[in-house]
Amino acid sequence: QLCIRYRFRIKLKIGGITMSYKDNGALVGLQKGHYAILKTDTKAELVYDSTHGEEGIKAFPNLVSAKVSPKSDQGKFYADDQLNEVANVLGEIDVNISSKDISMEDRAILLGAKMEKGVIRESVDQVAPNIAFGFAISKSKGGFYYYWIVKALAQPFENDVNTKEEKISFQTPELVLTDMPRTHDGVWRIVADSDADDFVGEDKFFSIEFLQEKMAEAGK
């Protein structure tokens, strides 16, 4: 079988400025789930824990869906009987991740609970860690958009299941996160395009090193 992919780059001239547009295709898939523990987030220091998973990045496999819903408050200022200025303030950011299954180990880590002999005892005293959560969205013409939600807190897992019936109904657990900007630099989300000429590469994108880089240093 021969698979041929066509990519189109269109140049537009607007107001004397030539702009380049490339058709990357539609969004068609979701995969490559990862997360990392945020250890320290202050104005002076930003540290992600390097002791979990592969050099600090832990795989979160079998993604089914991902939804990121930032909320904002918009203020409008009027002068001379007309709208004069508009300002947006970022508010709460809800993140919903569903997967085929969430392992007991991941549940314990994400909730800040302890697991012994396959048993997790959830208590009011446990403290869930802030995490970064990453994933990749595949494009119909090849390549990916890569995402990091850089600082989020997991909510306790809900149980919403049904009994088995005549028709098979697959039931998937959901990880619900509350995302927020980092104290260190105000960043709350990082997005990358694999088709960009200077893309850092997938391995580096999903790394502790990349998460801790300043924007001016990224890609070096």
Image (tube, rainbow, N blue to C red):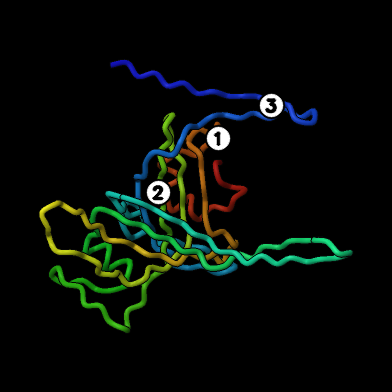
Q: Under tag 2, what secondary structure?
A: strand
Give the label, 1 or 2, closer to the camera.
2
Residue 150 percent location from the top left of the image = 48, 58
Q: How far apart in space, not on screen, are marks 2 and 3 (Cα)?
A: 32 Å
Left or right side of 29 for 92: right
Q: Which residue is mark 3?
A: 12
Q: Residue at x 16, y 72 (%)?
A: 119
Which badge, 2 or 3, comes first in the chain's sequence? 3
Which badge, 1 or 2, comes first in the chain's sequence? 2
Residue 106 percent location from the top left of the image = 27, 62
Quarter occupied by the N terminus: top left
Amino acid bearing label 1: Asp
Q: Which residue is mark 1?
A: 198
Q: Which residue is mark 2?
A: 135
Q: Under tag 3, what secondary structure?
A: strand
Q: Under tag 1, what secondary structure?
A: loop
Q: Nearer the viewer, residue 11 or 114?
A: 11
